[in-house]
Structure formats: C-alpha cells, structure tokens
Image (tube, coloured by chain):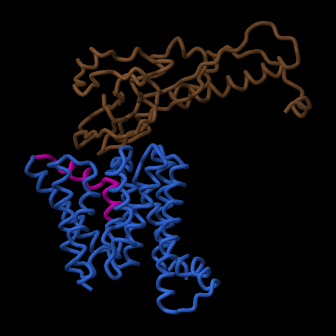
Chain colours: A brown, B blue
C-alpha cells in the first residue's frame, strides 16, 4: 500500500507486527526462506483474524535499504497519481509504503477487509540479526570470557529460533557450531562485572 | 467509600483496558505520549476548576485574605474534580494515536476546556474525550484512530460487557448503551439482509471491541447526555443512524466519534431543558 500520509492498517480487523529484532543462529542465513515461512505460519497460528505488518517505511530514504526503493516511473505505474511533481531534494518523494501480509479465508474473515491510511509515520521492518563469532585463536583471559558469552548467546539464539518457528530445539542445537568455551572460574566474574 | 464514586470504578477499568491493550493487543503506544495527555488533562482541570472556585468565592465573600485564596487550589472540591480529568485522559490514551506530544497536549487541553467553556447549567455540551479527539483530528495533521485495535474476540466482548455493566449500574445509564446497540445492530442487520450477506458478517461487525467500548464507556457520560429516558432513547437512535450513514455512505472510519460530536451539537441545547 502506498500512501502520502503514513502507515496503512485494517479498520475491521487487528493489524499486528511480525516478530522483529530477534537474534537467530548463523545457519538461518542459508535457509532464510524456510525460516521466514515457518515463522509466519507460527505467528499466524498464534493469532486469530489479523493482518500482519511486515514493512512500513518512508520511501524518501532508507539506509540500509531492504530493497531498492521504487523509482518515479514505478510509483506512477503503481497508481501514485498524487506524487509530488517536483521531488523535494532533501526529502525525496512524499510516499509512505506499507506491506501487509494476510491469509484471507472465508471462515476466518467473514467481513471484507477495510483499510485506512493513518498519520502513523513510525518505521518498521522485520529484522533478524545474525552475529558471527570470532574464529581465530584466543589465548588471553578476556578471550575466555568472550567465548563463554558467545556460547550463552548461541544457546539463547537456539531457543529464540525454536520459539519463532516451532522447530525442534534439539535439531537446532545440532546445527549450531557451538564455540568451545572453557568454563570461566566463578570468582573471575565477581571482579570483572 | 471510595468505590461508591463511579468515577473511581471507571478509572480502574480504563486503566485495566490500557494495560491489556499494551500487553496483549500489540499496541504501539508511546508511554511519553500517555504522560503528556494525562498531564495536560490534569493541569487544565486543576487550573480551570480553581479559577471557577475562585470566582465563586470572591462573589460570596468580600474578604480577600490570601490564605483562603490559596486554600482554593487545594480544596477537596478542586482535587476530587481531577478524577474526571483522569477518566478523560485515560479515554484519550485508549483511543487517540499520534506521533507528537504537541497533538496529545492539544487533545487533552481542548477536552478539559470544553467542559468549562461549553456548558449550560450543570450539563456539558460535549463529551470531553470525544471533543478532544475531534479537536486533534481537525486541528492537527498527525492524529489518528485505530478502530480495529481490539479485534473481535469473545474474551474481550465478555470483559467489556461485564465491566461496562458494573459502571452503568452505578451511573444508571445502561438504557442508553442498550438502545444504541439495538438501533445500530438493527440498521446493520437490515443492510446485511439487503446485501444478501450471511449472519456471521453481522456478528463480526457487532463484536468489534472498539464499538462496545464506545457504547459502554463513552456514550454514557451522564453530564453530556439527556436526563429524561425518552430523550436518551431518541438520542441513542440519532447517534446510531448517524454512525451508520457516515460509516457506510461516507466511508468514515471515525464515524462513531463524529456522530457523537454532531448529536451533542444538535441536542445539547435541549439537554438542559429535559431536567
């Protein structure tokens, strides 16, 4: 949906954001497609009669951009007849884009969807963070603590992924390259934290 | 007792709805904006009711001792009036959304001022929260309402009906909510029949959490609706018809708020006389 105002939402059903800002294991990068569709399916099953908000952004600027913003011709082709004649040099064009994802069936949505454009200019995107641990040799004490923290994080990421997608936690753990961390003596943590 | 005051019950219930909305309904409510609207309502109420009391006081006694003047601003009458301002601010926080604190401050200020400036005897021309919403929608360009924010779940339907019933029993205005829902439901049913839609569409329309919250908690403010029962029934009918027309023929998603505003505008000179 393209609007000069801001986010577009439903007026007769709820509009809910997809899960975002989650740290997931490294291997998700190779199978992002499966990850996203299973995560969506999982969210869909948890919610009743909602539209999911996947992306909401001012088309004037994005950095980094998740995809190339639509250019003038594409916008006009998409029916944006209200596009500013003279694009503002600083603010770009006056278009706000909203991407909604609805699994629409007769049983779940008795009444047709009704949309409204709001003045909500909050930006949103589904964001899934992958952090790559340092793989070189580590010999110092601080390094030991680092490895321990990476291991804790990896365990946390495995649980997050299981929660988001409904995948089996044991299988997820098998696929993660857990770093080898020597346990840090408990008294070290006392002094360092 | 504190709970005998319907305003306290209403504050607790509205606070609960706010918590539920933020906690379970995925609302993007900014806490800072809620603080702004609460502060704006409370400060406006405190100042204006102190001014009114001060004016009364100076008419009654010619004694102008500074202590009695200062006492006015912390007098029980002025302080208990803050309860109704808190209800208004909770109503605004539940319904009105905006990007900037200025818009919320304008809504709170206009809502409370309307009670003091637009009144006849003991009656307000407008429901304050409704006036604040309309003021924000018309005077600023970054306010909006999310009618779908509650969804249509049974759980919320029962919660609103139950808690709404408690408040309405206390203020004695259940007839207004019931009449509105019957009128509005009747109109939707006729439209549904005319379009040949099945009844689950109608059920979906009437199960909207926002519609129920409006009918049970906003429509029933005793200060801005007619005193006589016949007056209230006519009035509910007028709002139902207006909502129906604005929603289906003018495609206005904020139809219920505009209807209440318009009907108060049309009926308010009469509400005083129905005493």
Q: At 51% across and 66% down in the image, what residue appears?
A: B12
Q: What stretch is highlighted in magenta?
A: B196-215
In the image, is residue B38 above or below residue A50? below
Q: Quadrant of residue A176?
A: top right
Decide whether the magenta segment is chiefly helix, strand or loop.
Answer: helix
User: Residue B158, how many percent across, how many down?
Assistant: 38, 61
Q: At 31% across and 40% down in the image, what residue appears?
A: A10
Quarter of the picture containing the N terminus of chain B is bottom right
Q: At 52% across and 54% down in the image, what residue appears?
A: B36
User: Residue B172, how many percent across, how many down?
Assistant: 35, 79
Q: Camera-side residue: B189 or B200?
A: B189
Q: Camera-side residue: B39 or B179?
A: B39
Q: Camera-side residue: B70 or B217?
A: B70
Query: Is residue B202 inside the magenta stretch?
Result: yes
Find the residue positioned furthest to the left: B194
Find the residue positioned furthest to the top: A136
User: Residue B49, how many percent across, how many down?
Assistant: 48, 75
Q: Camera-side residue: B10 or B270?
A: B270
Q: At 62% across and 87% down in the image, what residue appears?
A: B65
Q: Quadrant of residue B116?
A: bottom left
């Amino acid at each position: 949906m393209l609007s000069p105002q801001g986010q577009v939402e439903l007026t007769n059903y709820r509009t809910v954001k997809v899960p975002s800002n989650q740290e997931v294991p490294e291997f998700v990068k190779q199978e992002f497609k499966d990850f996203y569709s299973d995560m969506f399916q999982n969210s869909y099953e948890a919610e009743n009669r909602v539209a999911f908000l996947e992306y909401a952004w001012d088309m004037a600027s994005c950095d980094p951009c998740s995809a190339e913003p639509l250019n003038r011709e594409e916008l006009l082709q998409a029916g944006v007849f209200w596009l500013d004649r003279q694009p503002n040099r600083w603010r770009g064009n006056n278009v706000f884009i909203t991407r909604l994802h609805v699994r629409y069936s007769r049983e779940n949505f008795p009444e047709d969807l009704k949309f409204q454009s709001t003045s909500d200019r909050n930006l949103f995107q589904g964001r899934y963070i992958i952090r790559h641990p340092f793989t070189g040799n580590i010999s110092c004490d601080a390094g030991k603590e680092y490895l321990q923290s990476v291991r804790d994080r990896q365990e946390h990421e495995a649980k997050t992924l299981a929660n988001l997608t409904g995948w089996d936690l044991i299988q997820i753990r098998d696929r993660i390259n857990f770093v080898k961390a020597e346990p840090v003596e408990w008294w070290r943590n006392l002094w360092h934290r | 007792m504190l709970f005998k005051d319907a305003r306290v019950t209403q504050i607790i219930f509205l606070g609960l709805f706010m918590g539920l909305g933020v906690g379970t309904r995925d609302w993007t409510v900014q806490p800072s904006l809620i603080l702004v609207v609460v502060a704006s309502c409370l400060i406006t109420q405190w100042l204006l009711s102190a001014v009114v009391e001060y004016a009364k006081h100076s008419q009654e006694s010619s004694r102008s001792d500074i202590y009695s003047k200062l006492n006015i601003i912390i007098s029980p009458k002025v302080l208990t009036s803050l309860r109704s301002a808190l209800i208004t601010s909770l109503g605004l926080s539940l319904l009105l959304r905006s990007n900037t604190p200025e818009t919320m401050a304008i809504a709170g200020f206009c809502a409370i001022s309307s009670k003091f400036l637009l009144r006849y005897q003991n009656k307000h021309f407008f429901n304050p929260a409704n006036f604040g919403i309309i003021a924000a929608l018309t005077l600023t360009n970054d306010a909006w309402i999310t009618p779908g924010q509650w969804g249509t779940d049974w759980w919320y339907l029962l919660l609103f009906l139950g808690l709404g019933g408690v408040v309405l029993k206390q203020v004695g205005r259940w007839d207004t909510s019931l009449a509105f829902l019957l009128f509005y439901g009747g109109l939707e049913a006729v439209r549904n029949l005319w379009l040949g839609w099945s009844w689950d569409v109608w059920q979906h329309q009437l199960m909207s959490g926002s519609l129920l919250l409006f009918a049970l908690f906003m429509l029933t403010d005793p200060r801005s609706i007619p005193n006589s029962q016949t007056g209230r029934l006519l009035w509910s009918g007028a709002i139902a018809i207006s909502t129906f027309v604005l929603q289906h023929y003018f495609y206005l998603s904020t139809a219920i708020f505009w209807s209440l505003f318009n009907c108060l505008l049309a009926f308010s000179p009469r509400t005083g006389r129905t005493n």
